[in-house]
Image (tube, grey):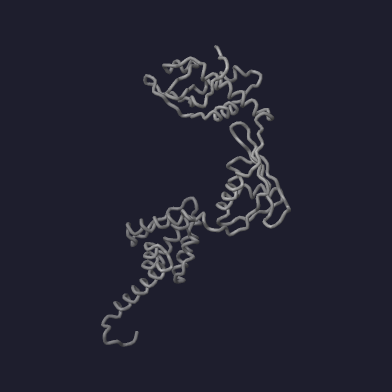
Amino acid sequence: MPNNPFITNVGEAKDDEDAMRRDRVRRMLIEEGMPENLAEILGKYEAEGGYWIGCVSYKHDVADLIAAYPMPPTTKEAVTKGAEAAAMMRGSLRVHRPDNIGVNLGRRALREIERYGKVRDKRPPTVVMPVVAELVRKVEVSRATFSLTLRPEGKSKPRVTIQGLSGQQILTYNHICGRAFELGLFCNTGKGAAAEWRKIMSKALPKAKVEDLSNSNEEATTILACRAVLRRILLSAERARTAGDLASGMVYAAPGRLAIAPDWAFQKVRRYLPDDKPTRQQIVEAAESLGVQTNFRPQLKGSRPRLWSFSVKVLAPGEGTFDE
């Protein structure tokens, strides 16, 4: 540093210069649109603050948005290293705030990063998505499966059709890519692809073809029969007043609801459909199609049995009764 009669302490002058430089970085980041508290940490705490911001922003899937701001190379490198370290930790990720970053400042910065997380699905995907050529929804009483036909963007062929997809599977882009690959179609994956796939599905579902298999599928017919039996049992059985009554197959009546012990529901349905021999899963699906709540626990003289309950509005009156 050149001789200057106004500078009496070189160390203090260097500190002042560093403080001015850090403040310039903070102001530059704010001018570029970065929230104030993030800019404060990146400007004031530089490498250490950048590393922490990188870790936390990776956890909220916005590390690429933070690193996209123009900033000094050393600060950007710290943000990138923090995100890379967080990626290596994966499921065991625990991000600890550096001691020199105040508690309140850290909390405000975290809230800003969380707000960033809410816009991550608005980012354009970095990959070319496959095109949904056809979507078929096959309805079977209380559930549906999907048949999905895909083709590459900008091409009519090759086309692949994936059968028997559940609702969860058809929304899981990685699952779709794996099934399509088995059939000979490669689908790209990358940041933003999963969110873009959900948008594609939300647009495709209202246009989907619907095939009602309730009357043509043998299993579906059995489920429909189970549903009819359940409805009639609930409407015609004697009303329970104690837990012992429930254990003998009676139905508990609550305001707007009817409830039955699930073990008795299984027994009675099977008793009245001996030729169909319904499985436990088929009876459960029949109950689900009637809107069952499986965790209804009324208070009955010191006992709180766990029952299946149904809305009276859903249970349309049946014909005849089932007698013991």
| Between 209 and 68, the one nearer to me in the picture | 209
Quadrant of the rendering where the C terminus is positioned: top right
Q: Residue at x 59, y 29 (%)?
A: 281
Mark yes or no: residue 308 visible.
no
Q: Nearer the viewer, residue 31 or 211?
A: 211
Residue 60 is situated, as x and y percent measured from the top left of the image, at: 46, 54
- Give the number of callouts: 0
Q: Where residue 171 sits in the image (x, y, percent)?
A: 58, 46
Above or below: residue 104 compared with residue 205: below
Asked if residue 312 can be seen in this view, the reply is yes
User: Residue 239: x and y, percent?
Assistant: 46, 16
Residue lying farthest to the top in this orientation: 324
Q: Residue 15: x, y in percent? A: 32, 75
In the rendered image, which quarter contains the N terminus?
A: bottom left
Left or right, residue 153 beside residue 100? right
In this rendering, is residue 70 above or below 191? below
> Measured along the vertical axis of the image, is residue 69 above or below residue 107?
below
Q: Is residue 5 above or below residue 301?
A: below
Q: Does residue 261 appear left or right of residue 155 in this picture?
A: left
The residue drawn where x is 63% and y is 35% is 139
Q: Closer to the camera, 255 or 108?
A: 255
When asked about the image quadrant of residue 78, the answer is: bottom left
Residue at 67 percent of width and 56 percent of height = 153
